Image (spheres, rainbow, N blue to C red):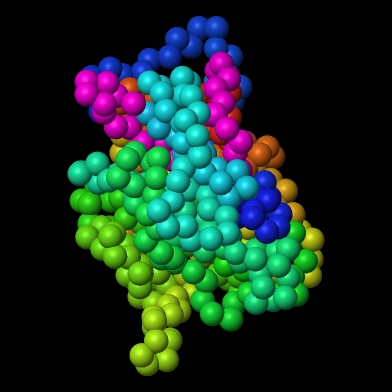
Amino acid sequence: MRHPHSSTGGERRCYASAMRFRPRLAGVAAVAVALAAPAPRAQDAAAPRIELFRAPTVTLPGRIDSNNPLVWHREGATAVLSALTSWGGVPEVSRGPAVDRLRLVGQVAFTSHPGHGVWFEAVVPDAQGLWYGFYHHERPADDCGRPERQLPRIGLARSVDQGRSWTDLGIVLDAPAGTAACESTNRFTLGGVGDVSAVLDLDERFVYLYASHYGRVASAQGVFAARLAWADRDEPAGKVEVWSDGVWLPPRDIAPRGQAPQWDFPVGTSLWPPTRPFHDGQTDADVFWGPSIHWNTYLERYVMLLNRAGDEHYTQDGIYVSYAASLDQPRAWSRPSRLLEGGEWYPQAVGLDPGTGTDRLAGRYARLFVTGRSSLLLRFER
């Protein structure tokens, strides 16, 4: 998960436009050429590949320990890019004319705050200009008697002023009841779900959530899928379906009759179950987590970048990449292949087309950001 945040109570995860970008590659050093993409699955006609080139360093404003959503809006005739960055459970917003010209505006405000630490990791705007932000919410593992550890979950908030203030719409996705690993030696999490990427499908029927599960059940750990009907975005409680054994399942209300709903979610099916899971008493691990997904207009498919934890301390094994032609078939994602070895957390591809390029949309060229810093350019090849 977005680790080490030092959240409000403990150690946190510290977790097609008219102009097309055409980089002048003369003088830009290639550092990796024709990286092999994952072996194609049934839906892949051909496996893409990625080339990496050094580029002038760009750093997003503010302190960062999570993925960072970016959104364009217009102020009159001017296109403005906003970035939401978070540290220690406190989100901030920056604005500017391009990703390399952002300036910090300040902390966001909440008309209603969910409590504890909040990290906005994905924002999906609607046609009316409202922003819907999916956040990673860390609460202390008090249920385990270990408040220095975390049990994250995922919430949704709405902004009417381009991210300056937010109204909480509540928790929309949590781990199934009873799945915490209270005796775990994991440095950060004893269970829960978090580190979410949210993408609206091309038909605008569902917003798909690809998130990370950190619970006790080894076969469920890692990246899993859920979805929310876009029409339910303003009243999302109890509406998120989890992909479980090939079926999209809703949560159950387990509250006693007459009391406020208490939603118990199904166990999501891990896209790539680990062979060395968390919470098994061993130090080593091989758990994928923290996906960031964009639609790539050049490849005409979705691209997922993700982390892989090498141990219970989330030591980064590397940055991995996976591909899929659609969001509604989680099994169709290609097996992740390693793009870079080691490094930091939170890889994101950010598109470069003015007015459209974000962490959710990119073309042949994109910047690779890792923990809010970019010194590499991605070139996708079909």
Q: Give the quarter of the figure containing the N terminus.
A: bottom right
Left or right: 277 in relation to 32? right
Choose between 356 and 139: the one closer to the eye: 139
**Relative image position of residue 236 (x, y in whole percent):** 32, 65
Q: Residue at x 66, y 69 (%)?
A: 141
Choose between 186 and 202: the one closer to the eye: 186
Task: Residue lying at the far top in this picture: please name it.
Answer: 26
| Number of numbered labels in the structure image | 0
Q: Is residue 67 magenta?
A: yes
Q: Give the quarter of the figure containing the C terminus.
A: top left
* Figure quadrant of residue 71: top left
- In the picture shown, does residue 16 fall above or below 126? above
Task: Residue lying at the far bottom in this picture: please name it.
Answer: 257
The part of the chain drawn in magenta is 54-80
Task: Residue lying at the far front in this picture: please name it.
Answer: 111
Q: Is residue 72 magenta?
A: yes
**Relative image position of residue 86 (x, y in whole percent):** 55, 43
Choose between 281 and 165: the one closer to the eye: 165
**Relative image position of residue 24 (x, y in whole percent):** 45, 9
Q: Residue at x 61, y 36 (%)?
A: 63
The answer to whether one can see residue 232 in this image is yes
The answer to whether one can see residue 41 in this image is no
* Figure quadrant of residue 252: bottom left
Q: Residue at x 44, y 65 (%)?
A: 171
